[in-house]
Image (spheres, grey):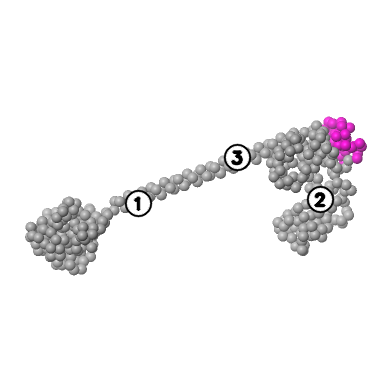
Amino acid sequence: MAFAKLPPLSPLPLPENTVEVGQAVKKGWVVYEVKPGDTLAGIAARYGVDPRHIMWSSNLQSDRLQMGQRLLIPLVAVEDRPPRVPPGVEVYRVRPGDTLQGVASRYGISVLDLVSANPSLESLDRLVAGSVLYIPRKAKGLVVSLTEGQTLVDLAARFGLSPVAVARANGVKDPLDLKPGDLVLLPGIQAKTTYQRLLAKQEAERQARLEAERRRQEELRRLAEERRRQQALAQQRARQVQAQAQNRPQVRRVSYQEGGMRWPLAGGFRITTYFGQRGAFQRYHTGIDLAASYGTPIVAAKAGQVEVAGWSAVGYGFHVVLDHGGGVETLYAHMSRIAVRAGQWVEAGEVIGYVGSTGWSTGPHLHFEVRVGGVARNPLAYLP
Ligand SMILES: [Zn+2]
């Protein structure tokens, strides 16, 4: 870009009319972003402009700058004429969304031709909106700025071209007419190296994008895998919890109408061992233990016939078994005394014995069982 070249840093503001020889200051605007430590005077000096001009053009109320603030710096025209653009070269201002390929095909030229006319391009992909592209409309070739002390003749010689042909292609009669900063078209010269470098850069960027995408996909895969693993773990835990719930003895409440029973102790008692728990003498407790004082009356939980009333060889001590019909039986163990005889009918609540600690027992309590079809069930399911 013709006007983007900045004068060297200068610690002191230069008088407005001073021009350093060789300085390629051009007319135009520079958008400058304020950096830490910047002062208006410093920036003005660096660009060789009056600080007041920056204030006016940037709409500043004071000379206090904020970091990141954008300033519009009006560059001072220090040349008597703008740099010369060869005839047949069009100045194109890049619009947002423009691509090099797009601009090239719009003008019917190759990307290489476009790169040759703009050898200072930094990328094949990124064009800066507002920047300038030189479009060779007639002869194709390399477009370069004439540097200080360089003549068209030198330039032609450097590229092995005839000075006359170069002068003709640039529409100049006298090769010495051109000044530093003027653009020169070197016909037939292609910026192949630049183009190849830009292509390589483009490919490297493409590979970097692919690599970044590959890493992103890998990360996504890893996350998905982790999520699946967590879900499987959660499902496994849920199954374990469910299995444990199924293994736990179920208390199914039986309504009174269905076969409800009353508590087999009339007085105060306390449940000391539940159904299914490991007891003092049983690995699996087949009933419930109700601790009560010695001699507390034991009553029939439901009306029925006395099936057993006597001593047990397997640890129940003095015990009674009642048959309630339909395969339902109740058992009352560790009695101190039995109050019924086998074959006798008892009503619900009728006294059948008294709390003791006979058989395998460590203290006065009633061991109470409910059996259905010969299988011990949880008595709590039948009790109110
Ligand atoms: Zn027991």
- At numbered mark 3, what does the secondary structure look like: helix, strand or loop? helix
Residue underneath mark 3? 210
Instruction: Please tell me which of labels 3 and 2 falls first in the chain.
Output: 2
The quadrant where residue 259 appears: bottom left
Give the amino acid type for the residue marked by disc 1 in the picture.
Val
User: Toward the viewer: 205 or 348?
Assistant: 348
Does the beta carbon at disc 3 come under 8 Å from ligand 1? no
Q: Quadrant of the N terminus?
A: top right
Judge the density around disc 3: few (<14), some (14-19), many (≥20) Cα neighbours within 10 Å.
few
Say whether residue 291 is left or right of residue 113: left
Which residue does the numbered mark 2 point to in the structure image?
28
Q: Is residue 135 above or below residue 288?
A: above
What mark, if any, has residue 241 been given in the picture? Answer: 1
* x, y percent for residue 130: 75, 47
Q: Which residues are magenta?
A: 148-177
Q: CA distance from mark 3 to mark 2?
A: 40 Å
- Cα separation between marks 3 and 1: 46 Å
